[in-house]
Image (tube, rainbow, N blue to C red):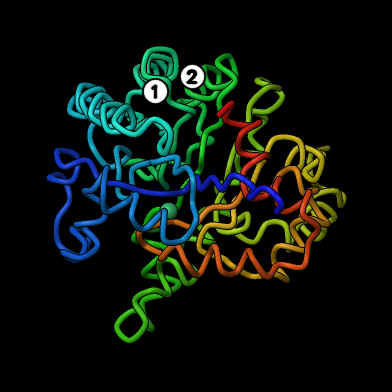
């Protein structure tokens, strides 16, 4: 019988109990979700086993460190990363991790990334949405993080968070009462993270740090579908010379998290190539079986399937 490909999922979340005390209200999550987010052991592994997932690369869910002030978050990120590393160390054959970064102090965040990678064995870091002041991650103040990630040769995962209140008010307010997810995973997160992606490419950060690697989830937050149009429009007169498509395809990897669509996958493969696409679920916000059941019936050959299931992630994260 053919050997089963190793299945790696890398947008899989937890919540650090101390970090979580900084958030309340709707963001505190339901008790059922909290039980999964709080678990770094049996419950998580049981659900991985039931779906055939071999390794989770674990990261904090949103909201996260970007919403906590610099003074508080620098020591807090260290404590959270030490706890996460201890959780991974209990199941080293099943878990790996992306670091928590105190991005409101970018130099300290860069140092913490280095500590997390070199001392705790983490595979990169995840950042979530706009920071406390509403700054996008392409702001030059954050570039020390990208410089260090490039030097360490680890990726930064750009994860969504709730959009700016001004955006929610202008774009989604009329429908929020009946359809709260319009501002989050149904659409708001996509717009937010696609905007982060476009801004990051235009910022010139990839000229400054040619080795920089970025991951986005949810099948690239719709960018592969719009890549031709973005690239063509940005090359019309009036725009500074740029090479959007080439920069995106050279520096970005995307995951299937929470977007188990075969047409979206095929489109992404045609735009970016199969080597850039990584299987992920977005557990526990999305259950594992819909992701693994979907993958089983994707009409690809076994070499491409093995790449998406885990080989691409293994190469990118040195697993
Ligand atoms: Zn997620």
Dots 1, 2 in contact, CB < 8 A: yes
Q: On the picture, is 290 further left or further right than 28?
A: right
Task: Characterize the local packing of mark 1: few (<14), some (14-19) or many (20 or more) Cα atoms within 10 angstroms.
Answer: many
Q: On the picture, is 63 further left or further right than 252?
A: left
- Give the residue drawn at x 74%, y 62%: 226
Residue beneath disc 2: 144
**N-terminal label among 1 and 2:** 1
Where's residue 147, x and y in %? 55, 18
Marks 1 and 2 sit apart, C-alpha to C-alpha, by 6 Å
- Give the residue drawn at x 41%, y 34%: 97
Height in image: 156 above or below 181?
A: above
Q: Quadrant of residue 261?
A: bottom right
Q: Quadrant of residue 125?
A: top left
Q: How many marks?
A: 2
- Give the residue drawn at x 76%, y 42%: 249
Residue beneath disc 1: 106
Height in image: 200 above or below 288?
A: above
Where's residue 264, x and y in %? 69, 66
Where's residue 279, x and y in %? 59, 52
Q: Nearer the viewer, residue 278 or 216?
A: 278
Tell me the quadrant of the picture where the C terminus can be found. Answer: top right
């Amino acid at each position: 019988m053919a050997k089963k490909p190793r299945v790696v999922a890398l947008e899989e979340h937890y919540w650090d109990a101390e970090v979580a005390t900084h958030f309340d209200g709707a963001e505190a999550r339901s008790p059922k979700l909290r039980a999964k987010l709080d678990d770094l052991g049996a419950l998580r592994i049981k659900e991985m086993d039931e779906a055939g997932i071999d390794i989770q690369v674990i990261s904090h869910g949103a909201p996260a460190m970007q919403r906590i002030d610099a003074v508080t978050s620098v020591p807090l990120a260290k404590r959270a990363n030490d706890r996460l590393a201890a959780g991974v160390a209990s199941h080293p054959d099943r878990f790996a991790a992306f670091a928590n970064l105190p991005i409101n102090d970018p130099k300290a965040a860069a140092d913490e990334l280095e500590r997390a990678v070199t001392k705790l064995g983490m595979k990169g870091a995840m950042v979530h949405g706009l920071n406390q002041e509403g700054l996008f991650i392409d702001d030059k103040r954050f570039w020390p993080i990208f410089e260090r990630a490039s030097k360490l040769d680890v990726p930064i995962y750009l994860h969504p968070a709730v959009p700016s209140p001004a955006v929610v008010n202008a774009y989604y307010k009329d429908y929020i009462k009946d359809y709260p997810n319009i501002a989050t995973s149904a659409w708001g997160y996509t717009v937010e993270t696609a905007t982060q992606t476009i801004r990051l490419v235009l910022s010139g950060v990839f000229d400054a740090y040619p080795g920089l690697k970025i991951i986005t989830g949810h099948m690239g937050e719709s960018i592969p579908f719009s890549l031709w149009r973005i690239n063509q429009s940005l090359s019309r007169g009036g725009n500074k010379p740029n090479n959007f498509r080439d920069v995106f395809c050279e520096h970005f990897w995307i995951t299937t998290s929470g977007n188990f669509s075969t047409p979206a996958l095929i489109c992404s493969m045609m735009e970016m190539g199969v080597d850039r696409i990584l299987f992920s679920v977005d557990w526990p916000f999305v259950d594992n079986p819909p992701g693994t059941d979907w993958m089983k019936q994707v009409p690809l050959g076994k070499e491409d399937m093995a790449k998406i299931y885990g080989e691409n992630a293994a190469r990118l994260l040195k697993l």
